[in-house]
Image (spheres, coloured by chain):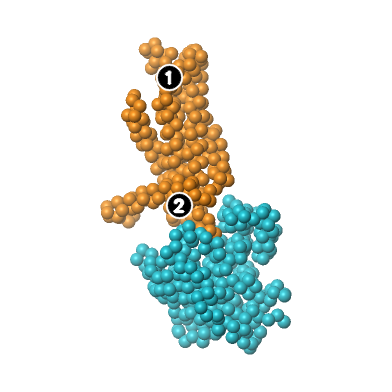
């Protein structure tokens, strides 16, 4: 049987120092029209980790992703992305940094006037440094990762909701970003399609060791990610062996009333005595 | 409907003007640094220029024809029908050619720009573009501004020419004016000031149409209803600005060059 990606010791004792941190929020606050969305929140995402963010609708989950990418500026606090302080960066500087980061939007946000091929290749074509055949190979590779290589010539409107999400993932991972931000990638999808997408996220985490923030309403998706690993040999997601000490780098962050009320791993989440959290996860 | 205080209303309007000025300035400034999207400029030139050709030709021709018809009935009373070529020529080149073409392109393209960019805003495509490391101002706004300014000049020249032809057709077919006389008087009356005024106006109108269309698109909020509102506002604002600017450019030109 293939070995799960990380053992407990590795996961609980991550390498120290600033280079081990992919993303860091430090005392971030933001308000919209006098309503405080985030109030001095701080957390870290280490390299290779996936952190699922939970919270009720309007609790600021998607705002965290937009702040992390510099699409929004916080009212106060500092954000470090891949070792660089982004809160004071100009938009031109951010464009360069964003080439190392990917985001999958809630509604996919595919360019509707471009085909699947052009959508997935968008970033490569913008950089305009690769020969055409290499772009084509990379597009095929990214689409085969999401198992949609036969849909290259279709337009987004001709795809199902689940397919659009998968194309969104392919567009994001084509340049192998160091950090990927997922905004409700399974929202509104049926359980089978959701599972396919979660398997892709686990594959991205365990095969490519990508650091990720995952915003989701579906607790079961994040729990699946915390209890499964990707078996590269069999090319599928498998549950962790029962009673083993093996774990995967999966962490959880819960927002309530503009504050973080939980930030930890699956075991800590299951062991928590906080009534709100227990009710939330039950 | 929620009431708004006069101070807040004034602040909102000033902020809108400030945002518009920033977008218009950035659209031009982007031309002087990389990356430049020549492919998108050519595509937009085709959509705006070639795509608008049929309506510009038709409106130009019939505007010239209507101008000749109206002028002829007045000139006949004074026995000066031979001057009809001059009237059509001056009217088309200085005023009607640029304004009618500007209004036609505003109706067709300012609305198109506002709805296209507005739809991209409300479906997060603009955020996706920024997230993918591409500046939407460079990729979407600058090509549209450059192409509209460039193509509107040529569309206006075509409209003027078709207006001459329409005027000529009415003059000779309905009023019996010798076509050679019509064309020679129409041509001879034109001086540098007329050509200058006729070509400066489309430059300004093209800039207004594209920047106003893009501004309303980028600032669109509130889903499909918001996009619809942005589209309407883009056409209304660009049409009003074209007619207002036209008056001031005409006045300025007459002040500089004399009557």
Disc ID at residue B189: 1
x 52%, y 62%: residue = A98
Name the quadrant of the N terminus of chain A: bottom right
Quadrant of residue A266 in the image? bottom right
Helix, strand or loop at label 1? It is: loop
x 72%, y 75%: residue = A233
Q: Nearer the viewer, residue B64 or B23?
A: B23
Residue A215 visible: no
Q: Tag 1 or tag 2, which sits nearer the N-term?
A: 1
Q: Residues within 10 Å of mark 2 (few under 14, many from 20)?
A: many
Disc ID at residue B218: 2
Q: Is residue B19 left or right of residue A172?
A: left
Residue B203 visible: yes
The percent position of residue A131, horizontal first and vertical second, equals: 67, 54
Question: Residue under mark 2: which chain is it in?
Answer: B
Q: Colour of chain A?
A: cyan
Looking at this rendering, what residue extends furthest in the bottom direction? A243
Q: Is residue B182 left or right of residue B9?
A: right
x 60%, y 61%: residue = A171
Residue A178 lies, with reference to residue A154, above or below; the image says below
Looking at this rendering, what residue extends furthest in the left direction? B6
The percent position of residue B169, horizontal first and vertical second, equals: 51, 19
Which chain is drawn using orange? B
Q: Is residue A196 left or right of residue B208?
A: right
The percent position of residue B84, horizontal first and vertical second, equals: 43, 17
């Amino acid at each position: 049987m293939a070995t799960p990606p990380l053992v407990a010791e590795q996961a609980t004792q991550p390498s120290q120092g600033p280079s081990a941190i992919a993303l860091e929020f430090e005392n971030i606050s933001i308000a919209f029209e006098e309503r405080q969305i985030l109030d001095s929140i701080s957390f870290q995402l280490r390299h290779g980790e996936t952190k699922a963010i939970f919270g009720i609708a309007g609790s600021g989950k998607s705002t965290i992703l937009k702040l992390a990418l510099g699409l929004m500026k916080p009212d106060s606090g500092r954000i470090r992305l891949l070792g660089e302080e982004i809160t004071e960066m100009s938009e031109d500087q951010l464009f360069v940094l964003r080439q190392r980061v990917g985001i999958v939007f809630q509604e996919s946000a595919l360019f509707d006037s471009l085909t699947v091929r052009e959508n997935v290749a968008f970033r490569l074509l913008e950089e305009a440094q690769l020969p055409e055949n290499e772009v084509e190979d990379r597009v095929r590779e990214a689409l085969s990762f999401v198992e949609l290589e036969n849909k290259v010539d279709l337009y987004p409107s001709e795809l199902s909701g689940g397919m659009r999400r998968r194309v969104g993932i392919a567009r994001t991972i084509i340049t192998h970003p160091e950090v990927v931000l997922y905004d409700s990638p399974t929202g509104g999808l049926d359980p089978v399609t959701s599972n396919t997408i979660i398997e892709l996220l686990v594959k991205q985490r365990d095969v490519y060791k990508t650091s990720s923030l995952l915003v989701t309403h579906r607790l079961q998706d994040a729990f699946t990610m915390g209890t499964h690993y990707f078996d590269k040999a069999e090319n599928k997601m498998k549950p962790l062996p029962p009673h083993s000490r093996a774990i995967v780098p999966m962490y959880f962050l819960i927002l309530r009333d503009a504050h973080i009320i939980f930030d930890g791993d699956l075991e800590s989440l299951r062991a928590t005595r906080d009534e709100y959290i227990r009710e939330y996860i039950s | 409907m929620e009431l708004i205080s006069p101070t807040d209303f004034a602040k909102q309007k000033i902020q809108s003007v400030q945002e518009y000025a920033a977008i218009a300035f950035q659209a031009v400034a982007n031309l002087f640094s990389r990356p430049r999207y020549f492919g998108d400029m050519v595509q937009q030139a085709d959509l705006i220029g070639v795509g608008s050709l049929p309506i510009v030709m038709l409106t130009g021709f019939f505007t010239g024809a209507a101008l000749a018809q109206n002028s002829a009935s007045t000139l006949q009373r004074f026995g000066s029908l031979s001057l009809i070529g001059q009237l059509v020529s001056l009217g088309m080149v200085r005023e009607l050619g640029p304004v009618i073409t500007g209004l036609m392109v505003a109706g067709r393209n300012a609305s198109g720009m506002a709805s296209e960019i507005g739809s991209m805003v409300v479906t997060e495509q603009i955020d996706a573009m920024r997230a993918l490391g591409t500046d939407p101002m460079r990729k979407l706004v600058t090509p549209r501004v450059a192409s509209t300014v460039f193509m509107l000049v040529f569309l206006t020249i075509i409209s003027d020419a078709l207006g001459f032809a329409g005027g000529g057709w009415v003059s000779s077919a309905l009023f019996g004016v010798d076509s050679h006389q019509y064309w020679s008087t129409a041509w001879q009356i034109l001086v540098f000031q007329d050509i200058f005024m006729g070509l400066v106006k489309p430059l300004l109108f093209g800039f207004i149409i594209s920047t106003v269309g893009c501004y309303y698109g980028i600032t669109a909020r509130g889903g499909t209803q918001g996009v619809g509102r942005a589209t309407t506002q883009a056409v209304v604002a660009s049409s009003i600005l074209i007619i207002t600017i036209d008056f001031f450019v005409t006045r300025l030109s007459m002040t500089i060059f004399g009557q």
